[in-house]
Image (cartoon, rainbow, N blue to C red):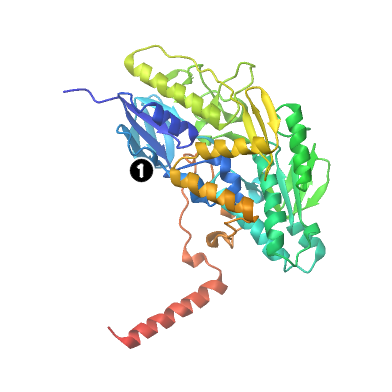
Amino acid sequence: MAAAAPHVVIVGAGFGGLRAAKALRKAPVRVTLVDRRNYHLFQPLLYQVATAGLAPEDIAHPVRAIFRRQKNFDFRLAEVTGLDLSGHVLRTDTGDLHWDYLIFAPGSTSNFFGLCSVEEKGLPLKDVEDAVAIRNQVLRMFERGVQEPDADRRRAMLTFVVVGGGPTGVECAGALSELIRLVLTKDFRDLNVKDVRVILLEATDRLLAAMPEKLREATAEILWRKHVEVRFGAAVTDFDGERVTLAGGEVIPAHTLIWAAGVRASPLVTSLGERGPQGRVRVEETLQLVRHPHVYVVGDAAWLPGTDGAPLPMMAPVAEQQANCAGANVARAVRGEPQRPFRYRDRGSMATIGRNQAVAYVGGVAFAGFFAWVAWLVLHIVELIGFRNRLVVLINWAYDYFLYDRAVRLIHAREIHTGPAEARQGRGGDGADEAPRAPEPDAGAPAAVAEPLAAAQAARDRTRAAAGP
């Protein structure tokens, strides 16, 4: 009887996990991908969900649909609860999985640098729940601000602070400013636009640190033209839900703080071995875990220095290239061939700053403005998974561009009564490390809502009883 094919278990359905599974499509192995969510999320466009440009389903695609034609693939919806490296066992809340090779790609989570108040009251941007919570908060502040008689309190409600000058912070601040200036000020005609502020705080002296200086300067200039107040050397030390406190003691009255100041590796890597910057685990050049050659770590969880000695950036292109290498190395291991080291090829980076404006550094060439924006649009449409997603996103972008409108200005009903902390419980990186989210019981509804609903239901029951069978 023929021996069973080696079993490869992949943790995480992010960019790394998906690419690793695809890299093994022709290998003589069985592939099982594990994630607590049944979809892949295109995180580079998550900020557009937060700023009402796209709906969550526009940038997500079911995992099973992606691999429908890959015969050696299986998917398990489960939360990872533990790992036995010596026994080759992955423990999940739906049972144990035994593996011959493990590819670990659990992604990352927000790094609050020990600021407990910011973690509790602030709004990170790492997952769908985070993006919807930000959208709810922005729209809710406008709804409350238009009813607030006190001028100082109204200005605090309409002040939106974004922390972090990386791509996420820059793109979010630019999109948020355009949502407010081009759309919401038309919806809320009674509000004075001068009461509205978007502030981008960066602790260092530069935005988009990985880009050339002229693009960093262009980014700051474009943001200023879009009415975003850019503050350098502004390190946040506290946020109580109504005031942002900076390191120098300055206080900014604001009810909304969006945290895009950093990420760290998923907590799942804690027990894997030596950890380096941002909680990442050290791996060999072949991406194998030190002293555990059957385990490969890729993406945000892997600590591997680049040619300059600095750790590789926590970005999707790095995760995808590492996943290709790990998948190929697993196939080589199955065939008894030697492993090959990973070499990262930096193809450049891009960031959009709203309508007609972006910065790009590709192939050693730096450019900004309209052509960079068009290149950004084309790249992200191509990279999206699924024809429907590409079509819907393209239609939404055209709708926004020509009509100066945003299609998804809804306060999500399930979160309308929750604050920032409650709205995002269980967030994480690729989703494999998050705690399950329990359904919200009807009994938890406010009394002002629950009592009329109960009365209405009782009335319907009496009507049915009187009508008879």
The image quarter in which residue 310 lies: top right
Q: Position of residue 338 (x, y in %)?
A: 40, 11
| Quarter of the image where the C terminus is located | bottom left
Q: Residue furthest top?
A: 338
Is residue 260 in view from this perspective?
Answer: no
Above or below for 129 versus 379:
below
Q: Residue shown at 62%/23% (left/top)? A: 363
Above or below for 146 versus 384:
below
| Quarter of the image where the N terminus is located | top left
Q: Position of residue 37 (x, y in %)?
A: 44, 44
| Disc 1 residue crowd, few under 14, some 14–19, many 20+, Cα 10 Å | few
Between 20 and 265, the one lying in front of the other is: 20
Between 116 and 313, the one lying in front of the other is: 313
Is residue 457 in view from this perspective?
Answer: yes
The image quarter in which residue 33 lies: top left
Q: Position of residue 468 (x, y in %)?
A: 29, 86
Q: Which residue is mark 1?
A: 94
Q: Is residue 84 left or right of residue 41?
A: left
